[in-house]
Image: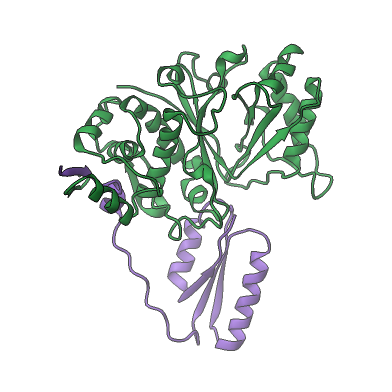
Chain colours: A purple, B green
Amino acid sequence: MTVVALDPTGSAAKTAPERRLAVRPASLAGAVLGLVCNGLGRGEVLLDALAERLRESDGLAGVVKVVKSSVSVPPDPDDWSRLTDGVAIAITGFGG
Amino acid sequence: MPARRHEWPDADAFQEDAHERGWTDGLPVVPATPEKVAAFLATVALPPDEVLGRVPTREVVVTAEDAAVNAVMAGCRPEYFPVVVAAVRAHLDEMGNCHSTTGTLSGAAHAVIVNGPVRREIDVACEAGCLGPGFRANATIGRALRLVIRNVCRAVPGFLDRATYSWPLRYSFCFGENEEASDWTPLHVQRGYAPDDSTVTVHSVMRMVSAWDSTARGPEEVADTLVADTRHHGITGDAFLGDGISIVYVMGREHQRLFLEAGWSKEDLQGHLHARLTAPATGPRDRFVNVGRPENVLVVPAGGAGMAETWILFPHLAWAVTRPVITG
């Protein structure tokens, strides 16, 4: 017998706008790198070291670092703006 | 906009396609026919597009219809649906922190704790075996919340669910407080509701630890065990959560009996525990427990006789949020 049923992903499918991955830069030379530190463990130390390596090896123009005010929530809106307005590529980690 | 309809030639085809589309937790699901979904919505007298909550970081809106579809699929009876709605509202409260608690590496689960008359009306198990299988209301209400989290909030393993291991409590975790076991103030009354109200409290669970002590002969000894086993792990917290983090002690009958015989109220126990949980840490296995106030130490009697045991439900990065069960 034919089964008719409703889609359980309802609103997710209906409300989420289509998102596409940003174009990946071919090189980091002259680019501004974003760092998003989530506040867990020694993540900030790790990301600082990674940025320093990239600055030396790839010729970054600068680094914008954001440290989340709380582990449990995304960055503050102002920090999001600093990232979206000013960096070509960003690195983060997640955990907890 | 109503949910999309799909059609399959038979029940087997539906089942296989539901798995193929990723609509299930790996177990069979019930087809959410328009008639069943309408019957569920009628129990709460809500329009299909009533918004129960949002997950802003995922651009997700959860409607009553979304919850009903997933509750049908989880195997709920219609009369369970008001409890499911309350659970979804509680979880999607800002302080329930859906994004963090469902995406975390730690694989946090969500305990759905039911209080008030609805427990007996729909047979939510509160006594022997209540944390395990065999009880339809417990199994399907907890599963309904999980299916909402998966299907609507998009916490799919490998996608927005980044759990390293995840754990079995993520299939379903729902039980009731055994309010009739004593004259202790039930959880929902402590949180401002009337005894005749029914509520759901959703508590994120990062780890669940058994505090087993069969040699204690007095309340202080049991409390010492609870404190030591809690401080072994500790709770950190952060600025967003402030002093609102809770810990839940699912207290077994053998432990509760010692407090009752000594004349302790639930509030006495909460104050006693809070003072000791929040004492300064003394080492790597004696850690500070960041629960801001005595009322954040949630004591929930449940379970049967025999084991001298209390289960400690450590929080993930969320508050324990309580919402009323409202029928239409």
Horizontally, is B72 left or right of B175 in the view? left
Residue B192 place in picture, x, y as percent: 52, 20
Residue A10 versus residue B279 in the image, above or below: below
Residue B206 position, x and y percent, is: 59, 45
The residue positioned farthest toward the right in the image shown: B282
- Residue at the spot x=47%, y=30% of the render? B134
* Above or below B33: residue B159: below
Residue closest to the eye, A59 or A43: A43
Q: Is residue B54 above or below residue A36?
A: above
Q: How many labels does the image show?
A: 0
* B224 left or right of B153 in image: right
Residue at 40% x, 24% y is B325
Residue B255 lies in quadrant: top right
Quarter occupied by the C terminus of chain A = bottom right
Residue A83 vs residue A4: left or right?
right
Q: Position of residue B70 (x, y in %)?
A: 33, 40
Could you tell me if residue B2 is visible in this image? no
Using the image as rendered, state which of residue B319 and residue B179 is in the foreground. B179
Residue B115 visible in rendering: yes
> How far across and how far down the image is residue B93, in percent?
45, 39
Quarter of the rendering containing residue A17: bottom left
Q: Quadrant of the N terminus of chain A?
A: top left
